[in-house]
Amino acid sequence: MATAGGAAPPAMDDKARRTRDLLASFYNTDPSAAAAAAPSPARPSPTAASASPLDSINSTSFDPDIYMNVLVQQSNLEGLLQRHVKMAAEIKNLDTDLQMLVYENYNKFISATDTIKRMKTNIVGMEANMEQLLSKITSVQSRSDTVNTSLFDKRENIEKLHRTRNLLRKVQFIYDLPTRLNKCIKTEAYADAVRFFTGAKPIFEAYGDTSFQDCKKASEEAINLVMQHLQAKLYSDSEPIEARAEAVVLLKQLNFPVDNLKSNLLEKLEDCLLNFQNDPTQASIGDISKTFRAYLIIFPDSEKRLIELAQALFSNRYETVRENLRKRIPSIDLLAMLRSLWEDSTSIDEVIPEAALPAFSLETTRDIIRQHIATAFLHLQNEISDVLVRTPSTSNEKLEESQLQTAMETSKIKVLQGCIDLLQEFHRLIDGNTELLVKLRDLIIDWVQEGFQDFFQKLDGHFHMLSGRSKSFSQESSGMESVQIDKVSTALVLMLAQLCVFIEQTAIPKVTEELASSFSGGGTHSYEYGPPFVPGEICRLYRSSGENFLHHYINMKTQKISKLLNKRFTTPVWIKHKEPREVNMFVDLLLLEFNGVVSEVKQILPGLIRRHRHSDSTGSTTSSRSNPMREDMLNRSNTHRSRSQFLENHLAKLFEQKMEIFTKVEYTQESVISAVLKLCLKSLQEFVRLQTFNRSGFQQIQLDMEFLKSSLKEFVDDEAAISFLLKEVNNAAHERCLDPIPLEPPILDKLINAKLAKIKDQSPNMQ
Amino acid sequence: MQGGSSGIVYGGLKYQARCIADVRADAGSTTFLAGTLSLKEENEVHLIRLSPAESELVCDGLFYHPNEIWDLKSCPFDHRVFSTVYTSGESYGASVWKIPELYGQSNSPQLEKLFALDDHMGKIRCVLWWPLGKHDKLISIDDRNIFLWNIDASNKSAKVISQGSADMLPNLRGGAWDPHNHNSVATITDSSLHCWDLRFMKKSNAIEHAHFRDVDYNPKKQHIIATAEDEFGICLWDLRMLKHPLKNLPGHSHWTWTVRHNPEHDQLILSAGTDSTVNLWFAKVGTDESGPESPSGSPTREQEPLLNSYTDYEDSIYGIAWSSHDPSLFASLSYDGRVVLESVKPYLQRK
């Protein structure tokens, strides 16, 4: 051990293990199993071959010779000596362990023997005790049996008595029931009454026909009274809600048809609501909302019905508002209505939020306001068109002085004032500070802007329809309008033209300004195409419409005159014309037409503009008249050397004519009148070109033109252009004449003077 | 606009003139016939040819015509044959002429009169050849009647096959022969347009209450016509839907006298009138219009149909003619006798 003490701890472990193994094998009945088990977890040997004989020292298959041989072969002397010492120590250890084990076993054996000895002595006295116990128990059992049999009869009696007593108590209760119920009624303890009655009810049901009949009747009467009381309580609005709710519960317990009651009550409520609807002064919304709350508590299952009722109430009320809308009520009134409705809806909403009344109200209010705005615009449009249609139709034939003018002014004022009124109306809509309007403000602004955009566009379309120009419009709205088209008065078209200008130049800037000042913001919709009201676009629309109408007016007029001229030039045989004796009738007709134009134009269009004409005419009529002609002649003479002098002149004049005839038409009296005149004279020239004249025909034309020349002076300032065109007509007649010899100036003068005198004679008669 | 600065001017007509016609049968070059309208002088018919270099218009022949010419149409299948309507004093006449062989010399030989259409009593308005080619019929219109002639150029004779009367209508003004159907002719009066079926000489359908000066069939699309209006513009119509025009194109400041479709590109339309302006239009009609216009409406509508306005004229224009040899060219004739040849190529390329 001393030598092994210096060895490493694994050596110690080795030793301990071996010792344990040895001991195990010692106790084990099957050494082979121990041997098989022991070496298996053996420590890993450095070399299996060499270790096996050395390690097998503890196994059953240990061969001392081999062990010795191996040991001797493998180890040197020192090693052998060490092994010897180690082995001797182990042997000694084993010996002592063995001795210890033997000793311990021996001790155990001795103590066991002692115990057995003691047990033997104790058991001997027990037998007698047990027998004693048995006899006692038997005696107890017999005695208890005797007691039991003696008491049996009495016990049954007692039980029967007890049952009887219980029954009697119940019967007593039932007989007492009516009085008790009455007592309850007196104290208004309906809950107790109901409890009692429901307790007794099964008995009444089972034995009601027998001796309990009276009692049953009495108690039923009492309970009916209770029911009546309860109903009364339910119906009376003065009772606290809880009491009413309790009454309902009690009634329900009494199998009373509560649903009937409920529907009755709800019908009552409906009536009440109807009254409220018809005459809001009768009840306040506060009462109604209280009632709603009460019913909600009283009949918890009636919520759905109540929601329906509330919704019906509000949709009906909004319907009335809508009806009012058709009557075109002012915005203020509308707003008041909507506001009170909104407040009502919020107060009801506190009671039954499930009805979603505010959302409904908001939605409906939005619709209504939208509709309101739309109808307002529609009305304005109708009013404007009324003004336009009414006035010219009365003044169609006899053009009374300044009647058109007043019509024009009225329609102008109507448009402007209408727009401004609308704006003010709408302004009131967004002015309020109520919650409702704050929510809708942006939307309203958008609608107003949208409305104006739409309104102006529609108005433009309507103008086109009125003028009968737009065929597409007449296609869309067939029937009535298409009839109108045929008798569109020219004055109306001219008024439309002027109105377009007015709208473009006055109304739209005004509206834009107003919109900008009070209807800015908005834009809750993200408009892809910018803000809803685009004044530029509208202006453009009206500018072009205005021009269209103006041209249309001129067209209509020239068409009419053109027909006149056509008849004049196609009917007579010009080549066999007789010598001119007087100015032809058609000149009168022509002048009449011109007069019509002038009278219309003078009343409707602004009458300017002297300076305009002067600045223009100095440039074009006198100086430029000669200049371009000469320049032209110089330029052209190179290229067209072969021309005759006549054509050269002709050409030069035509060049000048081109400058003057087809100028841009402006919205002035002069411009329109001269445009009509020029176009008519141009037509006259073209008609002349299509004919062939003899000398007299030519002279007739010459005479007519000469007369026109003096007459037309009063119509138009642009004298140069007119006289030039008249000369053109003369030239054309000259060209188309087989024998162009003009009338002698004296004869010409004489004939014209004769005509003038005739007119003078007629005019006093006419007036 | 830039006007006629690009145009080639032919100044050979010495008198006023109303009529110019494209010589359709001449496949080799751009040729026009123009006739003068002079009451007192001797009238002329000019054969105008575009020089091969396309730089100037030359007079290829000058023929005296006995009376002033109100209408002149070239025979669509024989480039030497043409028809005229003429007046002398109060009498009207219509004839078909043949240009004599020139043999190099161009000093005014006499025209050969093939035959005269002399069954007319009233004022003859125009003579119509079937526009697309050889057809042995001819139509003449006077202010009351419409005549269908059977012509025989070799025998130099013409016979009236049938005759239709306009009855109560206002005076007829002119007409056009449907290139898609040689039984159909459109005539115009002061206030209406009528279509005639030549087989029965009956009017079939009509446009009322409009003031027409001229009518022209679309050469490519059947049933489509263009009319020139007194109301300062042209209209396009579908003959199956006469209530409203397909398109209304206002653009003249006085009467629109004449309207012509381009023989190749039927969307190109020329109009000319007494405001001394020739307008070139680009107007799509019919099936290809309804397609793109409905979905993307505004952009196509926004497109300005007026391609150009030629304003460099000194007097009213009564005659225009597209060249069928080169459809990008047209000639216009103003009353002062000036023929201007213009090319529409710059405006075509812009499309």
Image (tube, rainbow, N blue to C red):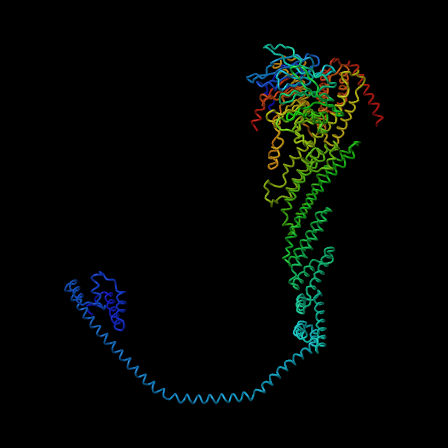
Q: Nearer the viewer, residue A64 or A494?
A: A64
Please report the residue visible at 60 percent of the width from the left and 83 percent of the height from the top. A159
Q: Is residue A19 above or below residue A649?
A: below
Q: Quadrant of residue A20?
A: bottom left
**Position of B284 compared to A65: left or right?**
right
Q: Nearer the viewer, residue A203 or A649?
A: A203
Position in image of residue A711 (x %, y %): 77, 22
Residue B280 seen anywhere in this rendered image of the structure: yes
Please report the residue visible at 70 percent of the width from the left and 23 percent of the height from the top. B174
Position in image of residue B272 (x %, y %): 65, 23
| Residue most extreme to the right | A765
Position in image of residue A83 (x %, y %): 18, 67
Position in image of residue A704 (x %, y %): 77, 19
Q: Nearer the viewer, residue A228 or B141?
A: B141
Q: Nearer the viewer, residue A372 or A690?
A: A690
Residue B317 seen anywhere in this rendered image of the structure: no
| Image quadrant where one finds the C terminus of chain B | top right
| Image quadrant where one finds the N terminus of chain B | top right
Q: Is residue B168 above or below residue A538?
A: above
Q: How many marks?
A: 0
